[in-house]
Image (cartoon, rainbow, N blue to C red):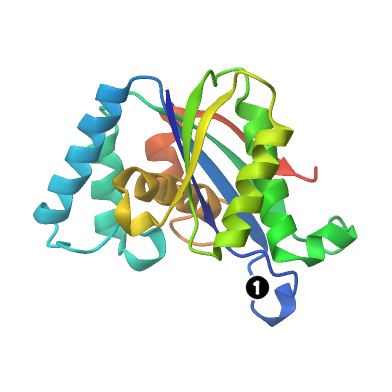
Amino acid sequence: MLAFIDESGDTGLKVDKGSSYFFVVAMVVFENHEEALNCDNKIEKLKMDLNLKNQEFKFVKLDQNKRIAFYKNILPYDFFYYAVVINKDPEKLYGKGFCFGDSFYKFSCKLVFSNAKKCLKEAIVVIDGSGSREFKRQLSKYLKRETEPGILKKLKIQESHQNNLLQLADMVAGAVHRSFKTKKDSNLYREIIRVKEKWVQKWPK
């Protein structure tokens, strides 16, 4: 079993000064390694088809047509996803830990792990991360401590440009995040991939 985690938005709390109103963490899960490899290969081919050679799929950098093409091309593959949407409304989100980006991120990851725990067994989990080596070490230690025995087999942290399936997680997180915004295409992308959705939790309620 393989799982890939990426986020959309930021952990900043100053929503009145440019921080995102929501922070989203998505987990994409493949129960079969061969299926994951096939999806990986399809994404790589799609880069060629869309003239994105040597680039990565990132939701915020793509136009609507490329986003739609991506989602439709990955639909045939057998995976599912969970996501957590953190509402950063200051009247709802409080606690000293949320004032620190690293703590905020770790807590969000823990929530998505908690929601997916019934579906995870001896999973190799890959998380997008370009922070310091120390933060990566702390995140790995934190998640291993906070998850129940038997869920995690191994946890890796990679940069998304090195992993097509982390890019898939980015695109899923982006689709979920967009569905909470007031835009013309708010529900467009999430509706395309909704068949893959296990649960999207908005927190706090």
- Mark 1 — residue? 19
* 48 lies left or right of 39: left
Quadrant (top left, top right, bottom left, bottom right) of the N terminus: top left
Instruction: Residue lying at the far bottom in this picture: please name it.
Output: 17
Taking the spot 54% from the left edge, 21% from the top edge, the residue there is: 120
Above or below: residue 32 compared with residue 108: above
* 39 lies left or right of 194: left
- Amino acid on which disc 1 is placed: Ser
* 94 lies left or right of 63: right
Percent coordinates x, y for residue 114 in the rendering: 68, 30
Depth check: give the residue in front, 13 or 69.
13
* 66 lies left or right of 135: left
Quadrant (top left, top right, bottom left, bottom right) of the C terminus: top right
Taking the spot 51% from the left edge, 20% from the top edge, the residue there is: 122
Disc 1 element: loop
Taking the spot 34% from the left edge, 20% from the top edge, the residue there is: 32
Residue 137 visible in the current orientation? yes
Depth check: give the residue in front, 190 or 106.
106
Q: Mark 1, residues whose alpha carbon is within 10 Å: few (<14), some, or many (≥20)?
A: some
Percent coordinates x, y for residue 14 in the rendering: 74, 75
Depth check: give the residue in front, 132 or 160.
132
Above or below: residue 1 compared with residue 143: above
Above or below: residue 147 compared with residue 158: above
Percent coordinates x, y for residue 96 in the rendering: 88, 62
Residue 201 visible in the current orientation? no
Percent coordinates x, y for residue 127 in the rendering: 49, 46
